[in-house]
Image (spheres, rainbow, N blue to C red):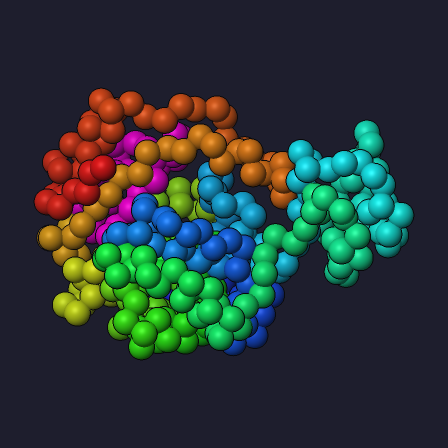
Amino acid sequence: MNTIGKQAVTSSRTAYEAAGSACKPHWQALVFDIKRFAVHDGDGIRTTVFFKGCPLRCKWCQNPEGLKAARQPVYLKNQCIHCGLCRAAAHNGQLDWVDGGPVLNHQYPGNFDAIVDICPAAAIRYDSTPYDLDSLMEKIREDAVFFKSGGGITFSGGEPFLQGHFLEQILKRCKAEGFHTAVESSFFADPQLVKLCAPYLDRIFADVKILDADLHREATGHDNQVILENIAWLLNSPEHRDKVIIRTPLIPGYTATKENIGAIARWISGQYPDVKYELLNYNPLASAKYEMTGQDYSLPDHAMYTAAEMEDFRQTARDNGIRNLIEE
């Protein structure tokens, strides 16, 4: 690797290591959601565990509540009964009272236990729950009966590899109990953690959003050097490459161009000619989550792509070397 490449990798590793330092210790993970009866996160009926924290800042993020590695309070405006108890219980600087309701200060350095506990309508709550290995396995076992029909457990995020040591241990436990396992990841992650976890995964969903490093940095905050290194390792590993499905979310103005899709298709098929590839239609519903978490959504309104537009994108992938295109 040349000097520039080494600097890019060092910069990327510093970014995800810094983000990871805000997470809980290795044997405790922050989980912001557990979705049961999921059918789009892998084979069969699945339970999807969403780990909190992500080092990327994609402008189109579908799960903004999972971005920050630290536990944060959220305000559900539609559940608020405007009783004012949180205002009375708040410490100085925790919130402002505007138009009859609270506006949380997400920069406040302490905890929000007092106002979370006192809210009678649960309109103010924490955005995540800490789990140790035993307690998370208990939650997973609740759905074990549904895994017998070809389903299993999927770990998503956020970025699950940001809590990678915990991920490795929970994967080992799942495999010991015979559960089918999957991960959904950007693979902006420590390569050593990827190599530790890969043997315990039955399905690997890997995002390749943008192939051009500068455009990737503009859209996500970081270059894609480590991402491509990790995915190249997976696609060149005979024991792992057939587990992998590469995904590209189609985002207007960023990923959804023929140039980008063609470049990704050439690169991944060059790594492994039989690579599986899936193009994900744009989801315009994510913007509603941003107000809840006190964040701004920067993309303009755009509808989902039509069936004809999706087929045009897929044909671009085929024309650039993709043999195994996944279509829904």
Q: Position of residue 281 (x, y in %)?
A: 32, 34
Q: Position of residue 108 (x, y in %)?
A: 76, 54
Work out whether residue 7 or residue 100 is closer to the camera in this orientation and state it: 100
90 horizontally vs 136: left or right: right
- Which of the pair 1/322 is nearer the observer? 322
- What residue is rendered at 10% in x and 45% in y? 323
Could you tell me if residue 21 is visible in this image?
Answer: no
Residue 223 placement (x, y as % from top left): 41, 52
Residue at the extreme front of the image, as rendered: 145
Query: In front: 176, or 192?
Result: 176
Q: What are the residue bounds of the magenta stretch?
A: 245-268
The answer to whether any part of residue 121 appears in the image is: yes
Residue 88 point in image, percent of width and height: 89, 48
Q: Is residue 194 magenta?
A: no
In the picture shown, does residue 147 fall above or below 165? above
Residue drawn at x 32%, y 46% is 40
Q: Is 265 in the magenta?
A: yes
Q: Quadrant of the N terminus?
A: bottom left
- Which quadrant does the C terminus fall into? top left
